[in-house]
Amino acid sequence: MIPPVLTDGVVTLRGFVSADAPGYAELNRDPVNVEWAGSDARMSAASALAAFRGPVAAGWRSGNELRLAIVGPDGSLAGTTALHSVRSGAASVGIKLAAGHRGQGLGLRSVRLLIRYAFEDLALTVLHWHAAAGNEASRTLALKAGFRLEGTVRGYALRAGRPVDGLVFSRAREDRDPLGLEPVVPTLTDGSVTLRAVLERDIPALVENCRDPEAVRWTTVPVDYSVTDARRFVYETAPAAWRAGSQQYFAVTEAGTDALLGTIGLHAFRAGTAEVGINLGPAARGTGAAEKASRLLIGYAFDQLNLQYLYWQVLLPNWRSRKLAWKLGFQLEAQLRGYAVDRGRAADIWILSLARTDPRIPSTPWDGPNGQRGSDGRVT
Ligand SMILES: CC(C)(COP(=O)(O)OP(=O)(O)OC[C@H]1O[C@@H](n2cnc3c(N)ncnc32)[C@H](O)[C@@H]1OP(=O)(O)O)[C@@H](O)C(=O)NCCC(=O)NCCS
């Protein structure tokens, strides 16, 4: 077989040429690739060249091991990707990027090109992906490329040469394109605030917001919220919930800049009803964004989803949340002792409701406390 040239206009996959040898040696020596991808920490340009002429060429001759160079938009060697153990319609996908080329979407582009080549040109029927437990970049890339996790096999992978648990993913030819699998999340905007799907670019702000003490105190975000939690939310929890129809998560963003302000969602769907959940980061609190985002969500829930009632549950004594709900027209139904679970403990809760036909303004005068306004005008 002859190595193909595959490109999407940004990334090109092609066979290796001698000039790739120094770059190939360097990316193999990269500590991240040595740790997670079993690459040769001592590879020199000469041994890279020997590999091109030896095992890499032999792999193409036999058709069992198909390794390609990844060339980035600047024309330099960005990495390498391969179809390993090609046999009986199946193969496993491998990829290593050079240090300076990670985090730019080149991995996903490369894998997409390779998948298309495998299914369409080679007529393979199934691809596998192996990742050592803890290799978050690999796990995320597999999911983004439409692989699904089949299981974790004890001691099946190597990390820095030692056995660790291995995650095994698969993607079959008949699986729809991963983009096609993503649920269509509506975009709602009032020109000032926008609700849209949570995306990869939200991850840093999501981590910051969910580590904020108020978020930890009043919501169910995991404690010590990490990038791993945020990735899981963006790539797994939120899409799976949308797909299943069990919960609908939106990112709340500033309409002009698309900067993430927080998240809002509908949960606990039952016939004609759902609960509202909201968590805005500290910078967005007290700006009116929470009210705007809530009004967009309420309008959507009643007018587009045709719900009859919305519920707003507040752990005591989160007056800020309760006052927001009051402003939106929610009415206090009950204060229930120990009805909520707060980090594993029974906690008191207020439950408020809003009917589709209720005016979306306070139904009674405010009878709770008022927040303390500091010298910066912010309420605490
Ligand atoms: C709850 C939340 C969505 C409210 O949004 P917000 O933008 O902070 O709300 P606001 O600042 O407009 O506050 C709402 C009202 O409560 C008042 N308030 C604020 N803190 C208060 C306090 N400690 N006691 C009494 N009233 C308070 C505000 O003054 C405001 O009333 P006003 O408009 O009459 O001045 C937001 O603070 C948040 O995401 N917090 C962290 C997570 C959370 O608690 N989520 C809700 C779980 S049920």
Image: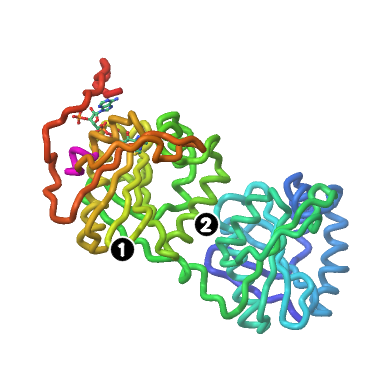
Q: Name the residue at 58% across, 68% down.
A: 112
- Seen in the picture, residue 185 relative to 346 is either above or below; the reply is below
* Closer to the camera in the image, 241 or 10: 241
Give the residue pinned by disc 2.
Answer: 236
Name the spot of residue 114 as percent of width and height, x first. 64, 71
Name the spot of residue 32 as percent of width and height, x first. 73, 46
Disc marking residue 34: none
Q: Quadrant of residue 315?
A: top left
Q: Name the residue at 58% across, 45% down.
A: 228
Q: Earlier in the sequence, mark 1 or mark 2?
A: 2
Name the spot of residue 325 as percent of width and height, x first. 24, 40
Q: Which quadrant of the frame does ligand 1 lie within?
A: top left
**Residue 351 visible in rendering:** yes
Give the residue pinned by disc 1.
Answer: 271
Alpha-carbon distance for marks 1 and 2?
25 Å
Q: Amino acid at mark 2?
A: Glu
* Closer to the camera in the image, 87 or 4: 87
Specify start and end residues of the magenta stretch as a single range.
325-330
Q: Is residue 75 left or right of residue 236?
A: right
Q: Name the residue at 86% across, 68% down.
A: 55
Q: Is residue 28 left or right of residue 252?
A: right
Q: Does 291 lie within the magenta span?
A: no
* Closer to the camera in the image, 136 or 19: 136
Q: Is residue 234 left or right of residue 379?
A: right
